[in-house]
Image (cartoon, coloured by chain):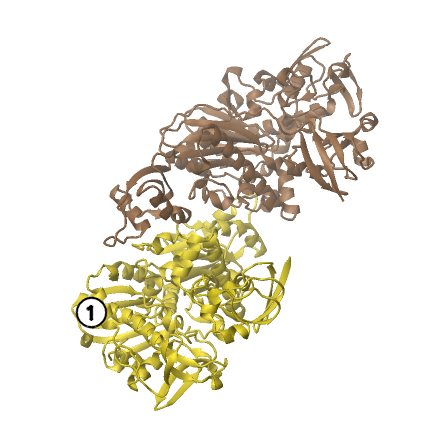
Chain colours: A brown, B yellow
Amino acid sequence: VKHTVDFEPVGRRAQAEDGEQLLNVARRAGVGLAAVCGGKGTCGRCVIQLVAGPISPPNSVESKFLTPDQLAAGYRLACQTMITGSLKVHIPPEALTTEQRLQIEGQALTVAVEPPVVSYELRLARPTEADLRSDARRVREALRQLGLADVQIDFAALRQMPTKLRENRWLVQADVRNTQGYEVVRLAMPGRPTLGFALDLGTTKLAGYLVRLDTGETLASGGAMNPQIAYGEDVMARITYAMQTPGGAETLQSAVVEGINRLIGLLCERARASPEDVVEAVVVGNTAMHHLFLRLPVEQLGLAPYVAAETQALDVKAREVGLRLAPGAYVHLLPNIAGFVGADHVAMLLATRLYEGEGAALGLDIGTNTEVALRAHGRVVTCSTASGPAFEGAHIQDGMRAAAGAIERLRIEGDQVLYQTIDDAPPVGLCGSGILDAVAELKRAGIIDRTGRMREHPLVRQGKNGLEFLLVPASRSGNGRDLTVSRADVGQIQLAKGAMRAGIETLLAETGLTAADLEEVIIAGAFGTYIDVQAALDIGMLPPVPKGRVRQVGNAAGVGARLALVSRRQRALAAEIARQVEYIELTAEKNFAERFAQAMYLDG
Amino acid sequence: VKHTVDFEPVGRRAQAEDGEQLLNVARRAGVGLAAVCGGKGTCGRCVIQLVAGPISPPNSVESKFLTPDQLAAGYRLACQTMITGSLKVHIPPEALTTEQRLQIEGQALTVAVEPPVVSYELRLARPTEADLRSDARRVREALRQLGLADVQIDFAALRQMPTKLRENRWLVQADVRNTQGYEVVRLAMPGRPTLGFALDLGTTKLAGYLVRLDTGETLASGGAMNPQIAYGEDVMARITYAMQTPGGAETLQSAVVEGINRLIGLLCERARASPEDVVEAVVVGNTAMHHLFLRLPVEQLGLAPYVAAETQALDVKAREVGLRLAPGAYVHLLPNIAGFVGADHVAMLLATRLYEGEGAALGLDIGTNTEVALRAHGRVVTCSTASGPAFEGAHIQDGMRAAAGAIERLRIEGDQVLYQTIDDAPPVGLCGSGILDAVAELKRAGIIDRTGRMREHPLVRQGKNGLEFLLVPASRSGNGRDLTVSRADVGQIQLAKGAMRAGIETLLAETGLTAADLEEVIIAGAFGTYIDVQAALDIGMLPPVPKGRVRQVGNAAGVGARLALVSRRQRALAAEIARQVEYIELTAEKNFAERFAQAMYLDG
């Protein structure tokens, strides 16, 4: 028996087997339903509302996460709901992972263009009975006359060569890669652009850039969700999926590759180019995203001592991973530093120039894992801290991603809560910067103390999970529910910022510095760009430095990827950075637990 | 409507659409039906006999090739027959292309083994919190300690690496290729053999050799039909199929690759090894087979001036062409010389050492195209002659391939014809060596003169196509038909040997030599091994030299492939040979037509 499931308001329809899990159907339909736990029933985020149709009765997991009122109104968890007939379901905005605000603009490129692929126009002699040289030899000899010795020809480019030469009447453009020796990666009609594609491959989002390799100019840029999100929202959930589901690694790989192909198609359309014109790509991501993209095993990344399969920079043929670019195009993957400090961090170091210059400087790339780098005394030390997904709205009662209706800024004035939401939509939850503001404001107003404990206040009440502060009453919210910050939510933020701060303190101790020595604190990444720096200082997420020393640089990883795309020298520099950076494994630090406990206090 | 077609005696069954061509069904069923013309109805070879079932009425093409008696007995051409119901058909042995006698044994290897892939046993430190090096770095550093610098790791081998290291508890064997730099092509349990596979990829047959790379020992060898034969028996028919049939090149490529995979599987089974142990392959074939195997375009090979897409030696990842070997295994393709002188000829020159030594020597590789090489005065000149398929039994009234029942030796004693058939089966036709003997004997007996004209004789009669000599009456043949040699058949042999001899004469003229200067005549290939040398001398197929100077060496191309498989030096030598050999395009020689006309005479 087959049933039909309609998803609103996204407008997707899917066929479902009798007895199939609704979350699974949603994934198949490409509906980005939040599922932090990967469908295990432990996060309670994949909330849907039944509009019409039969449904299995609620189970104990659903009763735990949903109130009787919600259950009565048709709210259910997609991971616990089995299909028993055709359905129409509504996805509340806070459960949707799609339609996020994406941070893709970074600094401008300021580097000499020295591209890995260069075009040469070749005018070849037509074969005759007196000149029976093979097509390939004709091309190689023409390139040799231009000073390029020992040129290899990519196998896929070779397959196209006889046709391309004759179609273009022996006047062609050869796109030649020069890294370790010369290699023809494409033959084309003279005048075709040689484009590059740079990708910041995030756990949550893809940020892509289409770049002219000859000038370094960015022709188009854009973002998309990482389609792997349907299989688990964080790195560990994906590693688990890859390890435990038969064919899981293949599913994750093809999901992200298809997403990247779509993004490239979109950017090429905007730039009126063809993906065939993309002769080189650079991909940066954390080590797990790097491995899943290449379908390298991730088991050893998920288990102590968490080692990477490969940390060195890699050149892989685009076709070997399923990217549809020019026939012989390569994907260059910047080096990783360690199991939890990936190529995206190297790209950030490259873009921010943190590795060079005098004086002590701190770099942070805030996310589910926050990478911290510290430059001091000619060294760069780095670590990764498990800051968790709280800054992305997960494990927070009314947390949500940075989508329409999310509170992103917040002030408490007496008994009044003033707030600003994304797109000025009616409030339905708090995104990361809103939560951070809320904790800082609760502390400033004296409603919580340095340990996070809540005192009595007109807006503080007993909630389902202990004390909670009422931010927005149901009457003014966009989903008919009270929006609150609970003591438990504050605790989540304390854990997140404590982990990050403990990492910072460990690096300072390693280099014998204190916060006062820091001449600069650089915050990279989408979340880091949106936060209120003063709030972050107030709750002690950042070490105590003058606010003016903090610089929010946006998506530095994307900038770094573009630098490596257009400059062979920058690639060499990235390899050098990865070699020089000293990785500190926090779990091996004997003072770490103590520093962590200390860092949990909300001390500015 | 679907029908069932049973093929006897091969025992294959296939489903067929109503109205489908029977030849097509036979191809799909893997029945090797002869079809020299590729199904165009111009060769009349795809004869079948209806055993049971309905069939479309005979058309004019069938009436041309089949006698009324044959048509009455149910004989039909598969390419002209449409399916109108379920059938049982019988394939006469002379129409079968399978089950041929294959020539796969050549000379013994006499070369220092210097393999392109060598195994190293690595004992690696297990990762700990104090040693977080990536898996790949661990392997590279262990290899560096063994003196191997800058080792690359194949991408597919890298994908297996984390699993292989842990399965084998950090004691592994790394198989490292050393050509232009080092590359790990496989990780395995210590002690796994490193095998190589050498293939002589012929238009008609595959001859494969499974070789231990460390010792050079051949563990297993065997032959199979080239499955492309179902799409046309000669090079031009295949090029036409690739050019004119949508998806034709892909069909031909996957057909031959699947055939090779099967052959490798068979040889590995015999040697109790796994195709995963095959870490390197070498393939030699004529230029068209080379291109079709790699799916390089062949249009330019089929049209004047017949140039190759690539003549240089190639290293291609086995997985890129669909061969299932060790993860990172390469296929090395020896260089081609020109459009019609391929890597098989280079392999023959390598194996026979024709390129070295003093004195003048001639090398012949007889086939549909016969390649001729002449060493003289420190030069090697070569040409290709279109000797045609007559030596393979095609275009000969009662010709057939070297299968059971083929007359392979023949003597005429007065009015008696003595003959020997393959497998001593009742005679059903003549294979190449039998036809050659027949022409030589007819000439010796004075039944034909030097122009090929037949005189009166008790066994000479008027046949369908002019005069013919009765070899075997229907009463003693295996197919109830008279077996004859016609004046037209003699003409076909004159054309074939004339082309070959004209090529030889052109090379002699080019180097200023005469036949008397030749110290050695080397004949390579299956056909060349079976022929009676005296017969070949008697009809002037070979230049007049003392019989003792003629050496039949068997499948020299296969030997050359094995030499290149186990020795990097031999590969370098092959490249050197291909560079040094001077190719003479016969169609550009102004004296060629005259030499050809002269060479048609049956002068010993």
Q: Amino acid at mark 1?
A: Leu
Image position, residue A490 (x, y; %): 70, 23
Q: Is residue B24 above or below residue A602?
A: below
A367 with respect to B248 (left or right): right
A490 with respect to A507 (left or right): right
- The foreground one among A309 and B247 is B247
- The foreground one among A318 and A30 is A30
From the image, which quarter does the C terminus of chain A lie in?
top right
Subunit of mark 1?
B
The answer to whether residue A110 of the structure is visible from this angle is: yes
Image position, residue A346 (x, y; %): 48, 34
**Residue with the mark numbered 1:** B508
The answer to whether residue B45 of the structure is visible from this angle is: no
Image quadrant where residue A111 sits: top left
Image quadrant where residue B383 sits: bottom left
B601 with respect to B531 (left or right): left
From the image, which quarter does the N terminus of chain A lie in?
top right
Q: Residues within 10 Å of mark 1 (few under 14, many from 20)?
A: many
Direction top: furthest residue: A414
Name the residue located 48 percent from the left edge and 82 percent from the top edge: B423
Direction left: furthest residue: B512
A307 with respect to B572 (left or right): right
Q: Secondary structure at mark 1?
A: helix
Name the residue located 37 percent from the left edge and 37 percent from the top edge: A116
- Give the total number of marks visible in the rendering: 1
Image quadrant where residue A405 sits: top right
Q: Is residue B462 above or below residue B131?
A: below
- The foreground one among A174 and B84 is B84
